[in-house]
Amino acid sequence: MIRIAPLGRALAVAAAASLALTACGGGEDSAAPASSAPAAESSAPAAQGDGVLTLGALLPQTGDLAFLGPPEFAGVKLAVQEINDAGGVLGKPVTEIDTDSGDTKTDIASQSVDKLLQQKADAIIGAASSGVSKTVIDKITNAGVVHFSPANTSPEFTTYNDKGLYFRTAPSDVLQGRVLGDLIIQDGSDSVAILNRQDSYGTGLADEVEKSVTSGGGEVVAKTAYDPAAADFSADVSKIKAAKPKAIALIAFNETTKIIPELKKQGLGPDKVKIYFVDGNTADYSEDFPKGTLTGIKGTIPGAAAPDEFRKKILEVDPGLKDFTYGPESYDATNLIALAAEAAQDDSGKGIASKLVEISKGGEKCKDFKSCLDLLKAGKDIDYDGISGPVEFSDAGDPTEATIGVYQYGDDNKYKNVGYQAGKIS
Amino acid sequence: MRRAVIAFTAFLGGLVILLTSSATAWAEGEGLRGTLQSQGQPVQGVKITVVTEADAPIGEAKSDAEGKWEIPVPKAATYKVTLDQATLPAGVALKFKDRTSLTLQVFEGSKRNVLFPLVPAGAAQGGADQGGAASSADESTFWDEFAQLAFEGLNLGLVIALGAMGISLIFGTTGLTNFAHGELLTVGAFIAYVFNTTFGLHLLLAAPLAVIVAGIFGYGQERFFWGPLRRRKSGLIAMMIISIGVAIFLRYLLLFLFGGENVPYRQYVAQDGFQIGPISTTPKSLVAMGIEILVLILVGSALLFTRLGKATRAVSDNPALAASSGINVDRIVRIVWTMGAAVAGLAGVLLGTTQILNYQMGQQVLLLMFAGVTLGGLGTAFGALVGSLVVGVFVQVSTLWIPPELKTVGALAVLIIVLLLRPQGILGRRERIG
């Protein structure tokens, strides 16, 4: 033991040194030189930021929700582009740092957050998955940085102790569950099975769907949570089959590509029962399944239709986009953060958070960064209405009004919009 | 025809919603609506009444020729909707007798759909004989489910067995607990994927090629990596830790190369199922199981009846004694690695065909493979086979009683119980002490 101690000490010193070295390395990358921070503080005593608004994008490049990544990144990029074209925030261009959020099975998100915090991000936009956000929310908010998700829908975050720093432009699943349940009832299915992921997103949404279906006169005959990392889903599906449902709500991410063949195998394909998807799995499956596999399946995604003009602009940023899911929400999130920093005349996380609710409602309406900025500069109170919806924040940082899109799959395994349902969440 | 009707109604619905939402979101106001149907036929002339929570009447309506009814309400609140059973036509009854009225909330700006499930009269009537029939129906669904799950268990068990066989032989001949064996499955599956998609070969051609490449990969690992490590007398624990590192390295290499999304092969995706008695299955699962059984029999009989197999078992029993009786231990170990990796690669391809490809697919079954190996008796090839089948069947069948998200628990419980009673595993030999 005695002989090990000096070695241990040496190791500790080496580890500390290497940490310090990496910290320095990170500092060099960071857009803001450390010396400018005290200068900004001395010039404006209220402001705590370093004068440059640094946005970290923590969005899925890999993992279960990788299909949601491209439109979200493009939304952030487009907004940053427009903000910088309009002169930036507090007179300086906004810096954007892209990182990968991975999924709940990997620990990529927390490494990405470390990297972003090291580079002095003032606000972090992400993650797409509620499960991932839950793993990093404490780390982000403890650092006094705004955590702003364009796609988290788990009802859990409404009441989570986030120190007033968590916001989102995606509506809580209370609304999506309500709309999906209503849709199932409207289609006349009285016995419904719910197959959901065992995580904060899946169980939260499953509960809301169940509530909506039962109160509407239907019956939930099976509610099965599955382990997303399971080797196969035959047991889960056979549990549902035993309940003989007329409709199945499948609350899943990318496991859908594994579950749909299993459903078909056990005689529960979309030609036999009505199947409903949610925002986690309503994606383009034209590469994954033979033609006609998904015909007739319906799905819900929070968010209004992206206007053509917005689609055109976002396609210029990323011409390879296949769909626009959560693109508008990411765009709005970025604009809101930038406007809040302007309104607070402070780019620190706390400064931004103090103004976000205020600029989202009650005041003169404006629809993009430039016009909102002009109003702000004229000393007016603004109400930002975004592409994704009116974005009126509740005090908990949730949108109180939102639209849920209803989609249906065609023979080509791609989905088309069949309608929108707006609603308020109190 | 039905599809056309659905598409048309969906189109109309979309149009209505689009038109209304374009002005102000929900100018038409709140309401309650529904469609009454019995076995797909509309039910006409049924009276529905709506009252507030305080029993103040709001309105009533009769279902029209299409079974539809709609009652506007003044504001978002909770309302009680009642169906007048006396107005139901003869031969039609409520599915849930006790649910003639529903209390539900109407939300701001939206029409809430209400469903009164209807069935032909008689089907809903309770009674002793009906109850008896129901319970016997329950019993038959129980056995149907049991049969299905046992079949799925066999299916899973066979795939696990293919992998476990390799783990067991490698452990037997070299003493290495190879935690990277799950990744050998994944690597095999993705090699076939490259042949299948990049080179456009049919899966039937890509699969054997992938098995060969996986075998070469296994040979290379032993020749250039594990072999030298062993010759340098690395400890078994150190080698085990190294294998965990190899597993992580391979897993994330695959993540880097192929991304984290599930990808399918080009052929045999989402096949329609068919029934064999109580079991529903797909042609591809049956073919996969056939191949698995064939390969297991081949490997088993090779071990039992060929010179090479005998030599392998000899090395497994006692490497030093085998070497001194003229067996080239290094050669045997290389062959074991090659065959083990090839069989694991095959398991990966079959798993990818019946399920889907993902960089974590091997890791997802690794625990089950180890459970199978340990259960059967470490180092015995046939023990691994039996153990894997037991684990596979237990994982699936246990979901009859426990929630499916906990299904691996059943298998691990069996593992613990068996090892408590028979520490050497089902087919393992008692280890000599001293």
Image (spheres, coloured by chain):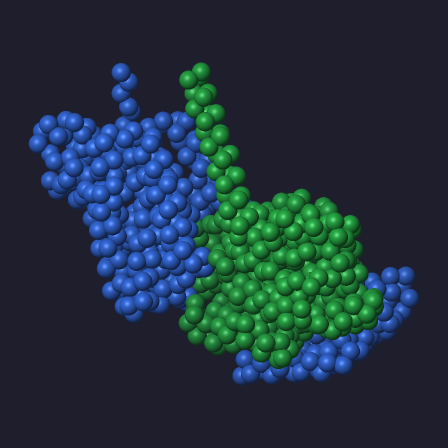
The residue lying toward the viewer, choosing from B48 and B344, is B344
Q: Is residue B390 above or below residue A407?
A: above
A402 vs B331, left or right, is right
Residue most extreme to the left: B326
- The spot of residue B88 in percent (x, y) is 74, 72
Q: Is residue A304 visible?
A: yes
Residue at point 45%, 21% (across, down)? A6
* B202 in relation to A36, above or below: below
Residue drawn 37% across the image and 41% down it: B245
State the image quarter where residue B279 is shown. Answer: bottom left
Above or below B163: residue A413: below
Of the 4 image quadrants, the one containing the C terminus of chain B is top left
Identify the hue of chain B.
blue
Q: Give the quadrant of residue B12.
A: bottom right
Residue depicted at 52% across the width and 76% down the height: A410
Please tell me which residue lies in front, B314 or B197: B197
**Residue B351 percent across, percent down from the top left:** 36, 55
Identify the colour of chain A in the image.
green
Q: Position of residue B61 (x, y in %)?
A: 81, 76
Is B234 placed left or right of A9 in the picture? Answer: left
- Indicate whether B311 appears above or below B50: above
